[in-house]
Every structure is written in C-alpha cells, then in structure tokens.
Image: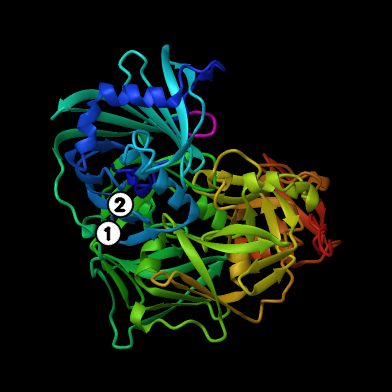
Amino acid sequence: MLKHVCASLLLLAAVSAGARSAPADDAAALFARYKEASGGAHWDAAKTLESHGSLSAGGLDGTYRAIQDLVRGRSASQYRLGPIEGADGYDGRIGWTRDPGGEVALLDAAEARRRASSQAWLDAHGYWYPERHPARLDRAEVRETDGHRYDVVTATPDGGDPVGLWFDPATHLLARVVQRQGQDTATTVFDDWRNVDGRRLPFRSVTDLADADGRIEPRQRTEVRIERVAWNVPVKDADFAAPAMAPTARIDNVAGVTRIPFQLVNNHIYVDGELDGRKARFLVDTGGANLLTPAAAAKFGLKGEGKLAGRGAGDETVDVAFAHAKEVRVGDARLAEPVFMIMDLGSLPAVEGFESDGLVGYEMFRRFGVTIDYAAHELILADPAKFTPPPAATAVPFELAERIPIVAGKLDGVPLRISVDTGSRVSLTMHSPFAKEHGLAAKYRAAPEAVIGWGVGGASRGRPVRLGRLELGAVAIDGVAGDLFLGEKSAFAAVDPQANLGGGVLKRFTVAFDYAAKRMYLAPNADFAKPDAFDRSGLWLLGAGEGLKIVDVAADSAAARARLRDDDLITAIDGEAVAKRSLSEWRQRLRDLPAGTHLAVDYRRGDRSMRAELVLADRIPATSPAAGK
C-alpha cells in the first residue's frame, strides 16, 4: 500500500548487515512458517483488503485509504499529507500516480514496470501462492543487523526487481522488506502485529531510504499506521484504474494556443509569467516540477509546510516544503490551484548569472501540448486538442518514469535509454553504471574530471568526452560534446535511464512534447549541423557582482597552465571588464574562440591584483576517438 508515496513527494535504508554463507533454511519452509504464524488457511479465503489509517513524512501528518486485490496484486490508494493529496495504483498491467497538482501519469518506463511487478507480488503474497505469482528465489541465509538475527530470502518476481524478505526467527513473522528505489535502498520495517478475523497484520510500518553510502536521513522517513481494515470488500476493475485529471488547466483564447517568448541562458529556457497575479520568471524544465525558491515564496506570500528531502544533480539533499497557490500563468496558459514545492536552489543565480523565481515543468508539459522553438526563442503551449507537431518533425516515442520522459536511442550503435531534460545545460551526460560497464572513459579518451554542471545539491563533476553518433529514432547527431558521470551519488548514478539529454543537443531542433500520446517531436533547425563546441578554458565560473569567481580549474587545462586557482576573482578578460557581458556570454566566448587564442586575464587573489595569460586549448578532440570504429 502507498507504494508510490515517497516517489510522488520526491523523497529520496541500506541495512548494515553481514550475510553468512550457511543457509538458515530453505525459502519454502520460511514462507510456510510465516503463513502459519499469521493466520494459516485463513489467508486462502482472503480475496481483497481495504484499509484506512494515518501516515506521516517530513514533518507532515495525514490519512490514507487503500484497497488491495490479494489474488491479482492490483491496488489503489489515496492519501492526504499536510497541504497536499494524491493517489497511486496498479491496474494489473501498469502503475499510475496522481500527483498533488492533480496530474495523472501512467508509469510505463522499464524501471517503473519492474517496481510495480515486485510490489504486486508482495501485495498478493506471491511467496505463498507461487502458482499465481512465480518468482526466482535465492537460497535462504542468516543476516544480523542492530544486534538482531534474521532469516533472509531474496526473491525476484517475474518481470520485477529483487526483493529482500527478512523474517524474525522467534515469531516467524515478516520483519522487514528491502528493495532498491532508483539509486537508493528502501527498507520497510513492520511491527505492531494484530489479529483481525483470524489473520495477523502489521498495524505499523516505517520506510527509510538510504543513499549509496548507507546514510539515512530523517526527512526521508515515512510512517504508516493502520486504524481499521475490512476483508473481501467487493471490487471492480474501475477501482484500480487511473483516474481522470481534474479540468484545472486552460488556455484563455479562442485559438487554444499561446506563444511566449523566452530567453535562452546557458541552454536553459526562461519565460516570464504570473503567480497569483504578480509577475514571475520561471525556468522551463521537463525534468522538474513546479518549484519556488524560499525568497520567491515569501515574495508571493506563500508559506511552505513540511520538511522533506529533495535531490538533483548535486551530491547533497535539500529541504523541500509544499504550498498551494491560486493560479500560475504563462502567456494565456493557466493552471488553477497549483501545488509548488519550495526548495532552496543554492547557487543557481550565480551559476546562471540570471535571477529567477523557480521552475515550471511536468505540470505544464502534462496539461498542454508543448513546442520549444529554440531558433525563434519561442515557447508554444496548446490545448491538447489543438496541438500539432512541428512541420517535417520526426516522432520519437517516450515512456514516463515518474515525471520524466525516457526515449530509446543509440550511442555508436549501442542501445541507450535517455531521459529528456530541458533543465540541463549540457548536451549528453552518461550515467555512471552505463559508462563503467561499457568502458566509455577509455573508449572516448575522456578528459580529467572537472565540474561540468550545477543543480539542486550543488556541483556535478564528470569527465568531458567527444562522443560519436547519437541516434534518437530516425535522427542522428554526430560528435556530441558530452560528459561521463562516474560517481556513486546524484541522479546520474541511476542504472535506468542510462543517460540524460540536455539543452546542448535539444537547441539544434524545434522540439515538441505530446504527453497524452507520449511522443516527442524533433524538427532540425539551422543550428542542427553546427559543431558542438566545448569550453576551451578549463574554468567553471560563478557570477560574483562585478567579477567572475573561479570555483573549479580542470586539471591539464588552459586555466591550470595559466596557474589560475579556485576562489580567484576575474575582473577583466582581454582588456574587457567582465561586467560588460553576461556570464552566459563569457561562457559562450570561451567555447567559441579557437584553440591557441591568447587572452589576458586580470584577477584578484585575496588582496592582490594579478594578470595571467590564458591560451585556450581543446580539452576534448574535435571528432570522436571512436569515429569510424
């Protein structure tokens, strides 16, 4: 029950345990003892279960109602948590969610399908009824954690992901379930077992999520308590089907289409809009949700509730609160009663050299047909019935993993699942599991690791590369300037998807999204065939008043050879005060000027004014080392 609540709220526990090689018992015997201890043959007559109770997460309290089909593994639940409410379910074929803003998504990406299959196996007690719900079982083993001993079986349901079942050898009851959730590990602990009509149920469960280092964060904890249950309630297929979306979105003109000019800053799309009747500036992000900074929330008079945890491209987690607004407007497109996350975006204004109030993302993309004309700097939102793809566009199907579109592609002939992220400035980031498995650092002769991006949670580091041919459906792009993330944390450590596509590639097209049909459309523009330029300075710069602050100097780069250092403050480049150009323009200049260009760099180091000669140099080759192989 409530299996998607953590993901829906953007919450981010590996168990510290040592496994002994000697088996505790065979899996079938453990399952049989658990069944006997919790009701035995009474379970054979249980077909459905309805439960009501309370839940808490991130300082918020609420209630839930859930119904489970104990035979087929179908489920549906609705929850209210503080200022937000939502729902999730599984109809026997596919999982779905209804987000706090009312947007409904069918979760058909591979990872979402595997997770739904595993949860259905648990909900239907597949360990007792393998003829209905088969699974591959590993040998049982003994594990110890926190001074307690458990008998553990790892099961992999058909079509699902591995699930660890931990049994208390004293009571024979199920003590905990351990599963992967993205790059984290979710551990649910069960207690307060009570007898209801001959069957014992855990009336309390607590779920913790741990990162790759096994660190558990209290903001990530979800607690569920059952208050009452009913067995064998009548159900019908509609009880488990995805609900319709509430009609809270509209376009206020007879054409059903609105055109909004945007600014492209560091390959990011910024639009002007309104929130509750006051002017606002938003970054448009397919990979994000409606979001406000704490300063913007205060400006618009919105008070957040809760203290959950959020994470993005950086390593660190940040506080997340929720608030209801009355209306958000972009052009003639309106969303009524939107829910906004309130999250500190840290150094983003300095990273961008550009101020904004927050993001609009999935909610807009889900409600409207969206076209991004990068060449004309125009965002076009259409009523779904009025949406038309760009002329001569190639259709690329996508799946949804939570809020993010996932497309199938190829990199130099190797199949690749790619998330599409207009909120990323880079061209293509390869996730660490895929990059390591395929030896991409050696294959593409990757440059030394450096800061390659900045997002929620801080800087993201990677190794720049010149990739070969990227294929998206029938569209092929050669020589993409990408990067390899090789760390163990952040969103780029996920096994699925395997890469993240950003504005560096998308800006070569007019790009359109039809979420109802799950299609992305790509129509090449005049920039399609231009070389994908990459920074030749080796500097990662932040805006700092009248100067540019150096926060990273790439090893073996032009900046390293010029003996520039972190925390130096650049005041002029080639005799021009840096204040005369935007940060985005300086970055573009350091990409576009040819290798060998000499630039005088005036800077301050502490109280000293200094000058260096920066000789721009290629950090990655002009063509892929894998080309022609």
Tell me if 259 is positioned left or right of 322 in this view.
right
Please state, as top left, top right, bottom left or bottom right, where the C terminus lies in the image.
bottom right
Magenta highlight on residue 210: yes
Q: Which mark is residue 89?
A: 2
When asked about the image quadrant of residue 392, the answer is bottom right
Q: How many marks?
A: 2
Q: How is the image coloured?
A: rainbow
Name the spot of residue 321 as percent of width and height, x first. Answer: 32, 45
User: Magenta region, mostly helix, strand or loop?
Assistant: loop
Specify whether 592 is left or right of 253. right
Which of 67 and 443 lies nearest the eye of the viewer?
67
Horizontal and vertical percent position of residue 215? 48, 28
> Does the segment drawn in magenta span residue 149?
no
Q: Which residue is mark 1?
A: 241
Query: Within 10 angstroms of label 2, few (less than 14), some, or many (20 or more) residues?
Result: many
Where does the magenta region start and end? 209-215
Q: Nearer the viewer, residue 496 or 143?
A: 143
Which of the marked residues, 1 or 2, is nearer the chain's N terminus?
A: 2
Asked whether disc 1 touches disc 2, contact meaning CB atoms under 8 Å apart, the reply is yes
What is the secondary structure assignment of the residue under circle 1? loop
Q: Is residue 37 above or below residue 275?
A: above
Cα distance between the residues tagged 1 and 2: 8 Å
In screen coordinates, is 240 left or right of 211?
A: left
Identify the image quadrant of residue 477: bottom right
The residue depicted at 37 percent of the width and 15 percent of the height is 169
Can residue 174 be seen here? no
Instruction: Determine if residue 419 is in view.
Output: yes
